[in-house]
Image: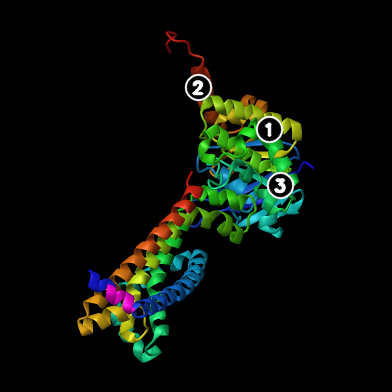
Amino acid sequence: MGAYLEFWSEHAEKFLDPLAEHLQIVGVTLLISVALAAVVSVALLRHPRAKGVVLQLLSAVYAIPSLALFAVLIPVTGLGESTAVLVLVAYNQYLLVRNIVTGIDGVDPSVVEAARGMGMSDARILREVQVPLALPLIMAGLRLAVISTIGIATIAATINAGGLGTVLFDGLRTLNSYKIVGGTLECALLAIVANAALRLLESAVTRRVVR
Amino acid sequence: MPCEVEFEDVTKRFPGAARPALDHVSLKVEAGEFVTVLGTSGCGKTTMIKCVNRLVEPDSGTIRVEGEDVSAADPARLRQHIGYVIQKVGLFPHMTVGENVATVPRVLKWDKERIQARVDELLALVNLDPKEFAGRYPSQLSGGQQQRVGLARALAADPSLLLMDEPFGAIDAINREALQDELLRIHQGSRKTILFVTHDINEALKLGTRVLVMDAGRVQQFDTPKEICEHPATDFVRSLLRSGEFRLRSAYVEPGEGI
């Protein structure tokens, strides 16, 4: 145990720099994912008939193993972070769009009818009624997306995107157990902390909505 | 500011339906009337009032509110000036009672003090103490209290026309009586025009200054409660009256009296 701590403190930058890269990939991915999912969801609410097909399509993409998707995209978008972000955004669309659409469809129709009957515009109904009431499910989708992005982003190291995956793969290649254990702990801790933080946020939001 | 409503040859057939929900309906509701729309389920009564605030668009015919063709109006602005109450109430569960009642004034961008004063005034009008209820959430209210809030919310911007779709249908008999009496009091105090859909003949006869009896999308009779009872126009109206009488009489059967 002492040997591990010594190695980690001596080579702290070998663990912290990839962590920073990892956080950056996850952050950029989430910003783009949420923005895109919002646009896709609004489009699906306007055109409910496309809902089935689009959700099927997104779930099909979600089912592709990440290594395979990276491999397919390398000839198109090359190696590096942008390809990684692209793949991660694609995966998140299923989790986010599915939960947003399911959440909004689950809002009591009589509440929406009352809102419309009082002369609220569609945009206002979405903003003030549907989204707030769907928030518990939307937040659950966001939490899933964050956790899965943190996990899958490690694999992005295989296409030179950096991140915690480099620590793990370096460790595996050189049979360096300090790196393998250290990288694994970092990944796990990051996921656990993110999960706990989002759960707190989720329950704060849910408490306000479900009374 | 009471307001009249006029239907001119209005027809609506929903896709896939065997017969029209509204079949060449023509009628005129005078300003300040309390019209109850009576019929069995599927007779077109809900479709009829939803055509007024354009939640349903008729296939043909014209509807005029205060002489203006509603199809020419902006639907959202039209609805902001027509109160709308539905059986399932549809209160916003994530907003307090006060916020719910303030919905339309907020959409109309009233200033804060005016909204606050109006909310208090309306809650008092529907017999809910503003101090006690304004901060509560809908789930903390009984069904009857929720519909009181629904009524207050519909009255918020002081609409001259109120559309009510079986508002008391899901409320127990005692609270329903109380709400009916309050609605009558509110109508007498404001002379708003009210279109009130119900399938309960006793409610229709009690509340309406005139009763509109509908069946199969057609107007069967449109007259005062007295005329309807004394001179039913069609077999359908007669059979409705019989069903109502039976319940009225059975309510007064003493134990041991037998039948």
Q: Position of residue A40 (x, y in %)?
A: 48, 70
Magenta span covers which residues?
A6-11
Query: What is the magenta segment's predominant secondary structure?
Result: helix
Residue labelled with disc 1: B124
Which amino acid lies under the numbered mark 1 shown in the image of this protein?
Answer: Ala
Residue at (66% x, 54% y) in the render: B61
* Residue type indicated by callout 2: Phe
Label 2 secondary element: helix
Q: Secondary structure at mark 3?
A: strand
Q: Tell me the SS state at disc 1.
A: helix
Residue at label 3?
B6
Residue B246's disc number: 2
Q: Please rate how many residues cluster around mark 1, counting C-alpha atoms within 10 Å: few if below 14, some from 14 to 19, many from 20.
A: some
* First along the sequence among labels 1 and 2: 1
- In depth, the one of B25 and B68 nearer the eye is B68
Up the image or down, A132 lies above or below B248; here it is: below
In space, the residues marked 3 and 2 are separated at their CA atoms by 34 Å
N-terminal of the two: label 1 or label 3?
3
Q: Could you tell whether B17 is left or right of A91 in the image?
A: right
Q: CA distance from mark 1 to mark 3?
A: 33 Å
